[in-house]
Image (spheres, rainbow, N blue to C red):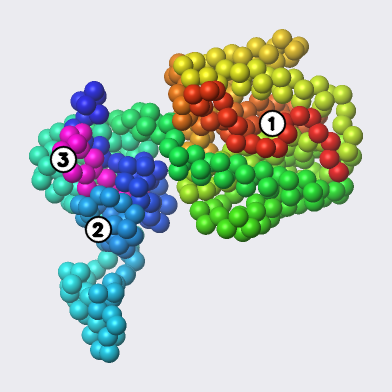
Amino acid sequence: MQAQGIDALIVVQPENFYYATGANAGFAALWRRAGTAIAVIPADPRVPPAVVIPDAQARSFRMASDIRDVRTHPLWVETEDLAPFLPSERPTEAIVRDAARRAGKEPQHKRPATYDIALALAEVRHILDERALLHGCLGIEMDFIPVNDFESFRHGVPNARFVDSSHIFRQLRMIKGPAEIAFLRQGAALSEAGITASLNAVREGLSASDVAFSYRSGVLEAARHAAAATFESTWDIISVGPQPWGAGASTATVTAGSQLKFDVGCTVGGYQSDIGRTYVFGNGNEHQKRIHGALLEAFHAGLEEFKPGNPISRIHHAAQTKMRELGFESYTRGHFGHGIGANVWHEEWPYIAATESQVLMPGMVFAFETPYYVDGVGGFIIEDHILVTERGPESFNTLAREYAEVG
């Protein structure tokens, strides 16, 4: 921030709010709009940070975050805090009236239909004024904020200069801490449990939807068995048969020689996993074996380059070069994977691309993949979670990457 001349960050993207405060931005953030939860992080470490959050979440925020300066704005949701008045023999209505007065509510107060960004920004203005930042250079995530919301911020703090802070959070979030790594590790484990369950259930005549349902059931059972309280959801892109895309892949049924491609993941503690494996039901053909074998060699070639200090582009170069050396001269990928973390989409910067100059550092976690989508043969993917360590790459995955026939 100091290097960029930024006086304070105005944090509005829900994932970045979580990263900056340690507390979830809450259910109102599901709208993906700026203004539901806002953190103000001054560049000067002597100046305390502050947040503006929905009133319904103030209590839970204070329990989760070290930030003490908490301002609120109203949501459509009505809540009451009766805890300070209980236990009591008094009538419930009397207790509620006292709690409302304590919270500063007027009788028959009004709430917005959803939320009122102007009320949230009024609190932001107070925070900035108290910290002598109303005329400052304020960083805000311009790769997230909707245009209409940005105009509201400019109108709400008219004398400030807003600049893009998206790159700051990309740089910060690419290095994962122990808790983040634990979420991603568990996500990979649950996803692999789902794949294993699906392979155990697969049989001739099942639809692609059946294969996907057995995967999801396997994930849920593994999460229940592990008492994974931070498990949130799972997703899958599963194809069956010789068509890797579209309706043909999603409506196909399992027959002898069917290609089974699993590109799957789980959300654990807000962190997205993303792994992939490919199998053949019954006896495969030579095309399936040769393509899978080449992708596996390319995977290992790229994996060798996951060393601290290497530019990320070297991984891309190694994997693509190996495929072309093995006879697939036209094989070209824009990227061979990506960072993973707390994001709505399971891909985040940095990408394993030919043009990526960012160097590898310990603590980075990638979804590293060598996919190929071949009409008439099927979809192929080998994809692991790779943690960069001082010693080199560490995979979170346990399922074999080699060509395998099942059923």
Using the rendered view, name the quadrant where residue 241 is placed. Answer: top right
SS at mark 3 in the image: loop
Whole-percent x, y for residue 294 in the image: 74, 20
Instruction: Tell me how far mark 3 sits from mark 2, CA to CA.
Output: 23 Å
Q: Amino acid at mark 1?
A: Ile
41 part of magenta stretch? yes
User: Is the stretch drawn in magenta largely helix, strand or loop?
Assistant: loop
Residue at numbered disc 1: 381
Instruction: Tell me how far mark 2 sits from mark 1, CA to CA.
Output: 47 Å
Q: Earlier in the sequence, mark 2 or mark 1?
A: 2
Question: Is the residue under label 1 in contact with that under label 3 (CB below 8 Å)?
Answer: no
Query: Mark 2 or mark 1: which is in front?
Result: 1
Instruction: Tell me how far mark 3 sits from mark 1, CA to CA.
Output: 49 Å
Q: Amino acid at mark 2?
A: His
Q: Earlier in the sequence, mark 3 or mark 1?
A: 3
Whole-percent x, y for residue 172 in the image: 37, 32
In the picture, measured across the screen, residue 35 lies left or right of residue 312, that is: left
Residue 345 visible in the snapshot: no
Question: Is the residue under label 1 in contact with that under label 2 (CB below 8 Å)?
Answer: no
Residue at numbered disc 2: 73
Up/down of 94 relative to 168, above or below = below
Using the rendered view, name the quadrant where residue 2 is placed. Answer: top left
Query: Mark 3 or mark 2: which is in front?
Result: 3
Viewer-proximal residue among 244 and 372: 372
SS at mark 2 in the image: strand
Q: Residue at x 21, y 44 (%)?
A: 49
Labelled disc at residue 285: none
Q: Amino acid at mark 3?
A: Val
**How packed is label 3: few (under 14 Cα within 10 Å), some, or many (20 or more)?**
few
Q: Which residues are magenta?
A: 33-51
Residue at numbered disc 3: 47
